[in-house]
Amino acid sequence: MKNNKYLPLAGLRVVDFGQQIAGPAVAMTLADMGATVVHIDPPTGPLWNHPANAILNRNKSCLSIDLKTDSGLQQALALIAKADVVIESFRPGVMKRLGIDFEQLRQERPELVTLSVPGFASNDELRRDWKATEAIVAATSGAFTDMGFNRVLMGIEPSFSPLPLGSSYATSLAASSVVLALLEREKTGRGDNIEVPITAALMEGLSYNSYVIDGLPERYKTMREHEIEYRRNNNIPMDLSYDDLQEYLDPFYRTYKCADGRKFYCVCPSHRNHAKRALKLLGIYDELVAEGLPDVEDLHQPIAEWDGETSIGVYPLPKKWADIISAKMKQAFLTKTSEEWGVLFGEGQIPGAPHRTTQEWVNSEHTNAAGLIIEVDDPEYGLMKQPGPICWLEGMAEPMLTPQPRKQVTYEEALTLLTDAAESETVTRPVGDAIQPASGKGWLDGVRVLDLTNVIAGPHSGAFLSRFGAEVIKLDPVTPLYDPLIGTLFTFQTDMGKKKALVDITTDEGREAFNRLVKSVDLVLINAPERQMKPLGLDDASLQAINPGVLFCRLDCLGGPRVGPKTNYIGYDDIIQANSGIMSRFGGPETPEEHAHLGTLDVNCGFSAGLGMAIAIYHKLKTGQPSRARTSLSAVTNLAQIPFAFDYEGRAAFDEPSGREALGNHALSHFYATEDGWVFMDSDTSELDKLASVESLVGITQAEDTAAFLTAAFKQAPTAYWIEVLHEADIAAAEPLAIETLREQYSRIADGTVGTDRGSYAFSIYPDHPSGHCITQIDHYSIRPLEAQIKAVSPTEAFGHSTREILASVGYSDNEIESMIERKIAGTGWGKEFLPS
């Protein structure tokens, strides 16, 4: 790879047996960071024959090896002998049966890092041997059933989405685990054997869809939830049209038609400043105030104690004010084009963006200027627009924007490549007899992080580090900017494992406390645009002056490795969903709809930031150089859309399945109604003979209309029958399950373990949660090393719970702390209740 010696993983040697998306994408991510990667396909070529392989295999040397022959196996083992990391993504046990036994390889070479990315967990006795395609994992895990309030009200179940969410989450998680294992190897000489099941990664990615808060106060229920309850209680069908549904959406969280006939997505609920700016920009704020729009001073008090019925900056708004505000906003948006509003919102620091297609996203001025989309001269497709890197280090990203195209090589060339890389390596880790026994510790034991983030993506990245032993200090303002839904409710997931303090860093004394905390940590983390760094004192020069060598990580919405016209625009997950084409695909181009999973991009942006921080820590240990890790929601949307986010001359139409009527990719990869429910079958024309061997599907090869044939056939037997006979024929199939069903089967009272021993699904119940509610949450269980410890982190503590402890840890006396609290320079809470009622 050109200039890879300047990248943080230069010198790392990887042998990639991965197929489909997740395995190759992990190796691609390592290659983007400078690793030397040899990719191995079976003799028949990639198991997924798709143009996206040009992306997944960039910066790689590719060859075919037949592992079922003695000569092929010996070639593979010879390549592995030169590698630091080996990656595979087959069903559990397949590689061992082919003669590549990771456990044995690590006994011979304990420095080796091995990674398996199976669909279902190897300790999932029920499903481990299933053919686990992307759609089968999604169907089994509730991703096609729990598709949000919109789909419930429209009576659509099951739903389908072509986004490879499981693989996108697994890519960031698994790549992070490899880098963290390399960090441990640098200290002890030992590698590790890691498994990251795509199912577990998907469940962690959908963590906001799967957690349950018993006795959730009424104030957090949206208009849609009230309507669902009303219809269920009165036996009214769920049959809202798309247009009718819009009137149940909060005015600050919905789509508006503009003067050009195109649509704009406004997303600024829960934040006083953003909502007020939007109303002023639209020219309707003064009208609303004149009509009596109330303004509650403290939204974090119980609703019974409010000094008004609602307020700007509270979500959800009551229907009365939602109707009034949305009617005025509809008229205002019709006065300008969607593109004009996009610029006005962006320049006005208001979250909002025009709906666009993925084709428009890939070819937009901003994504190409910012390095979010790059160009690669692929040998098959020519000059090809591809997604840029999912994370990067500032000052080191430029070589990542000019990757080498995939290259076919011979076995001898691949071996020489790895041999040369091995011989040129400067080894800084213990080797031979100096390699230490497994420590059983967390990969980040002893690392201290200062977390300044808010909402979902940023805080999620800090929480991600805590499972590996990092001590994470969450610093929030004394006076909250967000209402309790975003400001508190979401933190039950994002702030697990953290110690939380409240300090007003806009005061001189608060700034001194902040500086002391910066001196005490190894890494500072924030989500904010670049323009805020210097005013906050978080630019590199300011931080290094306080704590020379401190690391830094920043997440934002539209940022890339280079500056683009929208680099400093602010926004949330939904903004990028709208702008990058996800909503146009999910709902249809004329009726765009937010992808139903809360935090679809946010969570993976957090995981990607975790990867960036892991690389920064590893790079500093290797070189002594501090760095600034970066990622953005825009970078990870490309990973979630990797089967679509590319373009080249002669590319087939951007016509992937879209809209509410889509129930699959094509007739052989589709939902079908059975005698008693639904089944998703995921096959293709290469398996027609297999399908014809199923007694009930004899004749499929002669059918003129495959979809009609299968529709009639599947209705003749129950779902359980179809699952059994299709699995016997080695055809991928699954019953669509609800997350509620999985929770009922796989939940336990929190017991101090992390759930990695419990198969593909593991939930913990916290009856004594600090919030006062009983809460059920998915475990932090997707990353499963054999030797390192993954810790079951503590449930989220209340804001300011650890303020005194944290200030004391940086030298403040008890008297000084009490004085700071009394004068509101520090705080011990945002209200009378952790989760305001």
Image (spheres, rainbow, N blue to C red):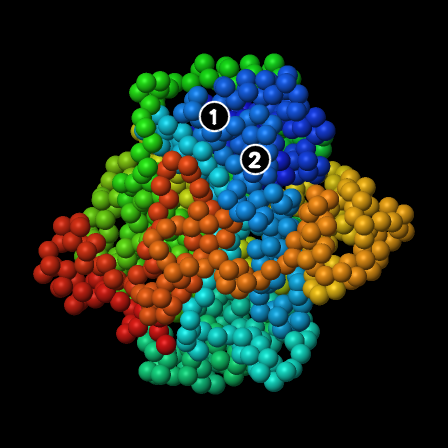
Toward the viewer: 428 or 58? 428
Q: Position of residue 543 (x, y in %)?
A: 28, 43
- Residue ID for mark 2: 93
Q: Is residue 334 left or right of residue 774?
A: right
Which amino acid, mark 1? Gln
- Quarter holding the N terminus is top right
- Between the residue at mark 1 and the residue at mark 2, the CA separation in whole angstroms equals 13 Å
- Whether residue 379 is visible to the viewer of this picture, yes or no, is no
The quarter in which the C terminus is drawn is bottom left
Residue sitting at x 90%, y 47%: 702
Mark 1, residues whose alpha carbon is within 10 Å: few (<14), some, or many (≥20)? few
**Does residue 754 appear anywhere in the picture?**
yes
As helix, strand or loop, the secondary structure at mark 1 comes to helix
| Residue 99 location (% of width, % of height) | 57, 25
Residue in view at x 68 percent, y 35 percent: 47
Chain-order first, disc 1 or disc 2: 2
Q: Which residue is mark 1?
A: 104
Q: Position of residue 431 (x, y in %)?
A: 35, 19
The answer to whether residue 203 is above or below residue 147 is above
Place of residue 261 in the rendered image (x, y in percent of width and height, measured from the top left): 69, 65
